[in-house]
Image (cartoon, rainbow, N blue to C red):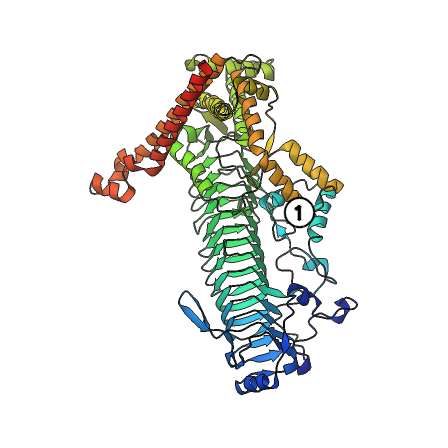
Amino acid sequence: MSQIKKGNIVRLGFDFIPPAFIPKGKDENHQRFEQNARSDYRSLTLEEIVVLIENGNRADSWEHILVCDPFIPHQIRHNNFFGLVRIGAMEPIYLEYRNLKLESGIYNSTIVSCDIGDAVAIHHVRYMSHFIIGNDVILSNISEMETSSTAKFGNGILREGESEDLRIALELCNENGVRSILPFDGMQAADAYLWTRNRQDLQLQNRFKEITEKRFSKTRGSYSVIGDRCIIKNSQNIKNVNIGSDAYIKGINKLKNVTINSSPDAFTQIGEGCELVNGIVGYGCRIFYGVKAVRFILSSFSQLKYGARLINSFLGDNSTISCCEVLNSLIFPAHEQHHNNSFLCAAVVMGQSNMAAGATVGSNHNSRAADGEIIAGRGFWPGLCVSLKHNSRFASYTLLVKGDFPHELDIQIPFSLINNDVKNDKLIIIPGYWFMYNMYALIRNGNKYESRDKRLLKNQYLEYDILAPDTVNELFNSLRIIEFAVGSHHNARLSDVTHEQILIDGKAKLTGDSHEIPSSIEVSGFEHSKRKVELVKVGQAYSLFKRFIQYYGSIHIIDFLKNNSFEQLKVKMKDSQRLEWENIGGQLIEKDAIEQLMSEIKSGKIDEWEDVHKYYHDLSKSYLESKRSHAFASILEITGETWETITIETLKSWLHEAILHRTWMVNEIFASRAKDYVNPFRNMVYNSDEERDIVVGKLDENSFILQQREELEVFENGVQDLLISLSR
């Protein structure tokens, strides 16, 4: 049965904090007075009380109503006041926002123990309890606004006297909760990633919990806050919220236990039918039309729209989820998921990703257990109606063809197309597919993500380039995989050949006569099954991978030589290393630096999340230099040169090849887009070429292609100038 409590009417508005939890020498308002330290309140005059009563207002005690000057009692009508209510300065004005014009003041509302800012317009708020309202706020037609003394505003903490089962945790990456983390306002994707890893390191896990809990006081009694210039209208239930300034909220069903970050430069909007419970919303977010989010973090400048469901998940900056359902997932920045019938569960998706309609990634309906996981490198793109089984892992820029993939996958080669050949019952992998067939989309996406990065403080370097330490290391690993596969193909009948000999033989075949390279070869370790797994077009992929690695090194050499000499280049190359890197939340960090960070957290040298974030930011400042070192080491390794053997002529040949490769890339960008203009099946829906050009735009006026050609010209001129200077 419902447990309805009864109390004396004179205590309505008081006893907010149970007496056992009020610190010695304090009262129930001590937290409130810290949150709002304003001191220019005064008591009402007798004349003001008379006017308030004549205007249909009543209070349990007019002594508990404090006001600031100027005070206009005629702008307070038909309200009920309980407990200590403090009202800011008033003006004879109206407030307007998007054609809604409301007289300033307080009308037809019940106010319980609240602080109300200057020049507000509060109309038809049926019940508002224990809130601090900022200046120039509009509150209109709201059913219920209340705060409990144990309010945590979406943070994974406990107040004094609370039991552990009341703690809010995010069950990321896995449905069984074994990778749970405690959310906090300000948490970044990198924080969530590091916390969900290394679960066997109990000391590290305990330290993450400790530094999270020390951010917050256990003391009860914090009031909900509505920041300056917020607008909330036509809404239902709002409980235990901390809302930043300039937020616009309309027509919501429920906001409960949430922090909503908002500011004049990055204001957040929440629209009709939304229900947000136990979560944190970043700056500049947009949440509209029936969204349901429970136990979540939505990072800055991200969007949830059209009935999206985000549950037990972290969504990184500059991302959009519409219509679909996302559960138990950790998603890095720049993720796109727009279709109602796509489903993402128990996954780490490392950003710059796109989920197509019908994609089902991580469903436990195709597994015997609910504790599986999927890890996908950045640029992950499952195609239409793709169904994946956990556990699976994917290298960067993996593209999956439409279909059901019945077995666990470990795709170790980046930029690949994966096809489940049902007719022949085999898995087909085209390494380097993006390089061969869709350079337009590959390069355009990188530019798109960078241009859409709206973060106000870009002190954490998010990598959007297709060629970076993570992907280049994967390319090097792929060369070894292809060499071993080709070598094994040619030594299939020999039993006494060593692994090293197979690699040497495969490399010789791949760098020799192209006719000796098989059109397809079998590999193992990519799928958990007994059927064939084939790599196709391996010769072409092998050559392209080497060319892209060399180009990666060359462009960094070109950049370095703009302000440095050849001799200085050799010195830098001498110290260069191709180390292991890891993508943590969209930022690439050397593994040694990650180990150092975790060591300093465990030792207590780093004892606050702000220090962890400073560690990220410091590494971001040196990232381009570290990336350059990696690029220098990569070109030396792929060409077989050393810093001692490089000559001016060697360098000039690399620069010439860089021009040729960049030119080829721009031509491929054009060619991959031009296919849509000569395809008769694409053209058949238009009655003429002129109509097609109006609908999709003229090919020779494509802004991205024109931009790439302009950049190529600038690049070529710059390299030619370098070549001239090197010849002197």
Q: Quadrant of the C terminus?
A: top left
On screen, residue 7 versus residue 302, left or right, reads right
Residue 685 visible at all: no
Front residue of 64 and 318: 64
Residue at 60 percent across and 67 percent down: it is 132
Q: Quadrant of the N terminus?
A: bottom right
Residue at 68 percent across and 60 percent down: it is 166
Provide residue 365's location: percent of width, then percent of height.
53, 47
Question: Number of numbered discs present?
Answer: 1
Front residue of 126 and 683: 126
Residue 381 to residue 64: above or below: above
Provide residue 507's location: percent of width, then percent of height.
51, 16
Front residue of 485 and 295: 295
Residue 97 to residue 312: above or below: below
Residue at 54 percent across and 18 percent down: it is 636
Provide residue 696's location: percent of width, then percent of height.
29, 42
Residue tagged by mark 1?
609
Given the image, on which type of amino acid does mark 1 rest? Trp
When asked about the image quadrant of residue 668, the answer is top left
When asked about the image quadrant of residue 536, the answer is top left
On screen, residue 466 versus residue 64, left or right, reads left
Residue 481 to residue 9: above or below: above
Secondary structure type for disc 1? helix
On screen, residue 701 versus residue 546, left or right, reads left
Q: Residues within 10 Å of mark 1 (few under 14, many from 20)?
A: many
Residue 156 visible at all: yes
Provide residue 122's location: percent of width, then percent of height.
51, 73
